Amino acid sequence: MSKNIHCMKTMRECLGTMVPGSWRMLAGVFLLNVIFFPVFLSSCLFFINVPVQEWTFPFAIIAAGGFSCLLAGRDYRKMGISIAFGVLCLTVILLLCTHTYDFSWDGNTYHKSIIALLKDGWNPLQETFYSYAERFPFLSSAKETWFDAYPKGTELWAATVYAFLGNIEAGKAFNFLSGAALLLILWEILMETARLKRGQAFLCAAVFSINPILSIQGLTYYNDAFLWEMLLLFIASLLYLTLFEDGRYRQIFCYSVFVSINIGFNTKFSAVIFFGMIGLSFFGFWMVEELRAADFRTACGKVSGRFFLLACSVISGLELTGATSYIINTVRHHNPFYTMIGEGSTELITLHMPVSMKGLPHAVRFVASLFSKVSNDTAVEAIQWKLPFQFYSEEFLYAQMEDTRVAGWGIFFSAIFLLSLFCIVWHFITVQTGSKRLFRLVCMLAALSAIFVAVVPGMCWARYFVGLFFWIGAAMVILCTRMSRSVSQSAMCGILLGAMVTLCVLNMSPSIGRNWKEIQNYKAIRQELSRLKELSEVGELQVSFAGDTTFYGRFFNLMDEGITEFRFQEEEAPDAMPIFPSRQLLYSVSGPEHLAEYIRRLDTDRYLIFIAAKDEASAAITGALAEAMQTLGLEFDMQDAYRCSYLAISDGSAIYEEKKEAEISCSMDVGGVSVFMRSGGYLEGDVASIMLDGVEYAKNRRGLNLVVYNKEKQYVVDSIYVDLFTDDKVCR
């Protein structure tokens, strides 16, 4: 009993009144809570059968602001700056994510599907994914076990954002948010502990928290880099609690241990391995360090509070925040890590490795990947070794992929990594005075990295071992520290630091280039989706998967744009056209069957209608068609105009109309678009041309050719033709 009371007392001391810090720390904690609170709150609500709510995300922002206010105390200036900066970061990142489309494979298969169902009302504690997915016909083929079994932390956070903003793309903001939060927190730690200058501390914090994998995954729903951001927070917190037991941020980092474990466990199953090994290593380190100075009983008493913190965090991460995976998997499959180990497990890592690396020991794979050409070609049968600082043009393309399998840390990473190791080893060999405790910690972390490489599958695959970048940050901290403390070594340290920074920037350039491309693609994709919405109002939109791919998530992109009137069909239509530049769906439009009905559906307040006849456009004219054309303000006296030329432009009233036996053409500016049109009967040119701003849109087929143009948004909505020599049916 007395022992339990002592543990609780120690825990209260550890999590007691939190000490206010700088605006950087407060802003970082604010962003961290913006990630944590929606996940934790939604997980709790599932237990009382309350699904994701629209108010969860704004409530979490307010709660995160309130938490920062408590930390700031009466320092209203610091409070205002930190919250304002945090809200600014959140707003910018959300805007960036809503104005880009996830281009990734995983994002458009299972991540978005889980997010959309959570937002729609699915409670994973009450119902399986597959049962709830019956509401969406296009999800009928989603049978993979991981839809139900995988941890859902990032998907749950994204679902709360989706429910509030109504845009599924906004939810991928967790990647860049975590990077921003960790940058701010580490910036303050480095200024507090390493006595670096402000710019140096910022540079080192940026290298720790921002890397090519986070950059390339930042605009997708991949969450590998996000998991390692939580691991970085966990390691940084434990290091602070180890080296600065009475530091002013001790309480904050006790809290961040709890947050990082709860979020990390609910991100990927592999988190349990990484967090577990790191946590146990630090606990062992604490025990050994305390035993150096005291007996076993006293040592246990001193570390009991931190052990209690770790234990409570793990229990919460597994049984509360992680209930939708660990508890549900245990209940349904008697295995909390279902799909990762045991019956029903899926070995995706080895399956997707290049042929050259299959069958090799884990450590050999890692070394081969580190010193190979950047590649995603799984058919390569021999390892493609390269020297540090060497690069090939084809590597830039592979370095722009979100899941590059070989040397995915970047084109210049092997050189950066070797320089970093040199700096770290050189420092500890040449340092005259220093903390032996710090040296032992570095050795422990190095041993952990080696164990990960030797034991854990997939460490050769960069997205599964983002922590390798942490050693780059450590080397830069050493260089900056030595520059500040030793005038004689400042030149050498400055050269090494400059070389590493230059290489890091070059190493980031492919991912930055890819993100810039996706930002530029947004307008064209949005315009295409807007056009599809208008097509769905004119005819029946049919959407299917492209070949044997199943990018379910793209359907939710359509629905977010208001494209809800479509029919899913399992087989693609012969005339189907692609949607999206990558991870495509296919669409086709059917109906209305007759031109008269098509015209009646057009909203002439929005559209310009361009008409050009070719060959013969009179024989199959019906009374209904003539009346429909006249509702456009046209005379359309074509009933007896055998093989006559005909041109017309209408916006509900006639802007231009001309009929002749000879070929005719017109050129004018209408509705902000430059127009050139030609029409010729069978003996007079036999042509139908409708060029808008120099681009041909007419089908140039026999009969009437129509182009529908949105004059407000300034793009072509539809292009059809009707072979009026035989009938008045609409063709595309």
Image: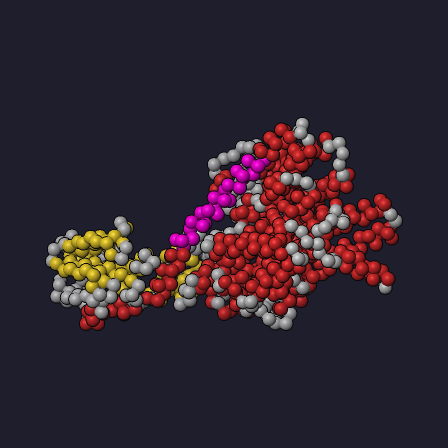
x, y percentage for residue 402? 52, 48
Q: How many marks?
A: 0
Rendered-image quadrant of the C terminus: bottom left
Q: Which residues are magenta?
A: 500-525
Left or right of 85 in this view: 574: left
211 on left or right of 305: left
Q: Nearer the viewer, residue 673 or 103?
A: 673
Which residue is at 59% across, 56% downward? Answer: 80
Q: Quadrant of residue 269?
A: bottom right
Q: Quadrant of residue 6?
A: bottom right
- Residue 471 occupies which quadrant of the picture? top right
Q: Quadrant of the N terminus?
A: bottom right
Residue 540 can be seen in this image: yes
Residue 605 on the magenta span? no
User: What residue appears at the point 77 percent right and 59 percent down from the top-left corner?
Assistant: 12
Instruction: Give the overall secondary structure of the magenta segment.
Output: helix
Q: Position of residue 723 (x, y in %)?
A: 22, 62
Residue shown at 51% from the left, 53% from the top? 92
Q: Residue furthest top?
A: 488
Residue 721 in the image: x percent, y percent? Answer: 25, 60
In the rendering, at what x and y percent does residue 692 appear? 27, 53
